[in-house]
Image (cartoon, rainbow, N blue to C red):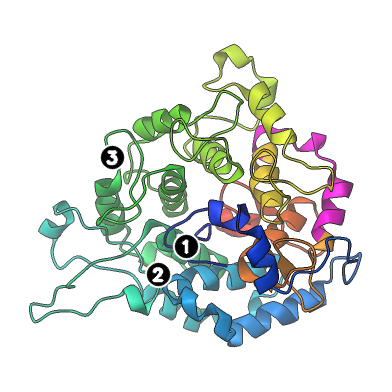
Amino acid sequence: MSETDVHGEAVDWESEDEDSDDSEEQEEGYTSPSQPPSSWNFDKDRHLVYLQMMYELLPHHYQSQEINRLTLAHFIISGLHFLGATDRVDKDVVAKWVLSFQAFPSNRASLKEGEFYGFYGSRSSQFPIDENGDLTHNNSHLASTYCALAILKVIGHDLSTIDSESLLLSMKNLQQDDGSFMPTHTGGETDLRFVYCAAAICDMLGDWSGMDKEKAKNYILNCQSYDGGFGLIPGSESHGGGTYCAIASLRLMGFIGADLLSNDSSSSILDPSLLLNWSLQRQASDGGFQGRTNKRSDTCYAFWIGAVLKLIGGDAFIDKIALRQFLLSCQSKYGGFSKYPGALPDLYHSYYGYTAFSFLEEPGLSPLCPELGLPLLTALGI
């Protein structure tokens, strides 16, 4: 897993499934995809051991991911919730730790200066205070803010205790004229990943004052490709992650409903049948989902594409038996899930393996809220 994971500081799915396959397979001890999985059943007990171990001490391989510490914590703690085991974490300690990453303005006037007062990704991105009591550099990030709020919701923390006014007012500074969002006030890519983060943040806080929904909607629609999927930016190739961000954002903002496929397509803001066709074509012959045309199946896309189909009401067309078999072939004997069959597990693919099995209604797992990628009861604030 790299610094460019889906909810990391510079979210980029391309690094997860592209042309570095051969070298990655060597680095991760890859074995033949024909190797049988450790179990043809979802091994919940082994996954609990894996997540508990990660909660207590991350292996040294994650040292390069220190800047994404909140993201890793989200995968662990939210993963434990899917497995019905949030009682294994000290919720008060977790809440105090997460809240320590929030950035605060020195005064109200500073909210108009362009800085974003969300959450830092880790201590290494949390710069010291100068002699005037101000941060020398504010580097809070939209993706880290999503992860921070997700953790707090999962453990049942009251989000009204957060300075949401400063967060949302400053988040408006990140929205560009075309409706896209920068991840931080100092710059960065502007694409669908951060539109989604902004929409999810507003939804979790129950306050949409942090973004112009109409401008965001127009940007999303400009990202739809000729084949029905969505690229990360206008004119780019359709991609599973970008398509999820587009559809989930439109659902969160209230522009599309659960009955999208059953409605008259002429009255829809997008072409649902074309989107359905593109999404279904992403299920490969091995049962897994690929992120783009002619790419290899990957555990995480079982969520990214599966959630899109769930959101538009097309999940009944998925070959769920074949998908389950592919996911089980990626289940590690150590617990967790790998990207491909035979590779070592990592937190990113493990978490989206759990969301995928939740989507497949695996017994003993919390149900999924596909719009937020979180446990359903947590997403509803229950």
Residue 47: give its label: none
Residue carrying label 2: 121
Q: Is residue 177 above or below residue 98?
A: above
Q: Position of residue 360 (x, y in %)?
A: 79, 51
Between discs 2 and 1, the one toward the N terminus: 1
Residue 146 as seen in the image, left or right of residue 78: left
Q: Position of residue 84 (x, y in %)?
A: 72, 70
- Specify the amino acid type for callout 3: Gln
Q: Is residue 275 above or below residue 358?
A: above
Residue 73 as seen in the image, left or right of residue 106: right
- Other-residue count near label 3 (Cα within 10 Å), few / some / many at <14 / 14–19 / ≥20: some
Q: CA distance from mark 2 to mark 1?
A: 8 Å
Q: Residue furthest left?
A: 132
Q: Is residue 250 above or below residue 104?
A: above
Which quarter shows the N terminus?
A: bottom right
Q: In the rendered structure, are the residues bearing label 2 and label 1 in contact, judged by CB atoms less than 8 Å apart?
A: yes
The answer to if 313 sits in the magenta stretch is: yes
Between discs 3 and 1, the one toward the N terminus: 1
Residue 363 visible (yes or no): no
